[in-house]
Image: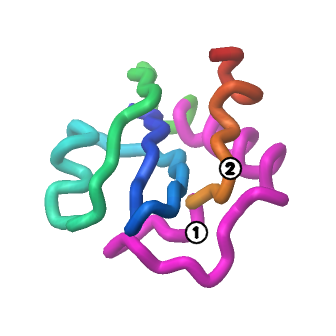
Amino acid sequence: ILYYVEFNDHGKLYYKIGITTRTVKKRFAGDPIPYRVLWSKTYKSGRSAYIREQKILKKYAKYLCNGVYILRSGNCELFSKNIMKDAYGK
């Protein structure tokens, strides 16, 4: 599953793209930050999901948050801007 979620860290919004083989709910079960799933897509292979994720990370790299650690893992895929509209046309 390739997912895109919004996190609310004390009123500051962050956006994350990522891949999981579990549900998104299970992926973030141990993280205390409130979130909502904005988009998710199931792929037939993890490789296909990975290729799509990497294209998005590269295209929107200027919006990646460096030095922000709000999650137990996956902080390097956090965006400071909601790039979903551009990335997915939604």
What's the residue type where badge 1 is placed?
A: Cys
Which residue sits at x=46%, y=26%? 39
> Residue 71's image quarter?
bottom left
Specify the amino acid type for callout 2: Lys
Range of magenta residues: 49-77
Identify the residue at image location x=71%, y=50%: 57
Residue 76 location (% of width, % of height)? 58, 68
> Residue 53 placed where, x, y %?
62, 41
- Would you name the residue on which mark 2 appears? 81
Which corner quadrant holds the N terminus?
Answer: top left
Task: Determine if the magenta segment contains residue 2.
Answer: no
Mark 1 crowd level (few <14, some 14–19, many ≥20, 10 Å Cα): some
Q: Nearer the viewer, mark 2 or mark 1?
A: 2
Left of 84 or right of it: where is 25? left
48 versus 10 height, above or below: above
Does residue 59 appear to the left or right of 24 in the view shown? right
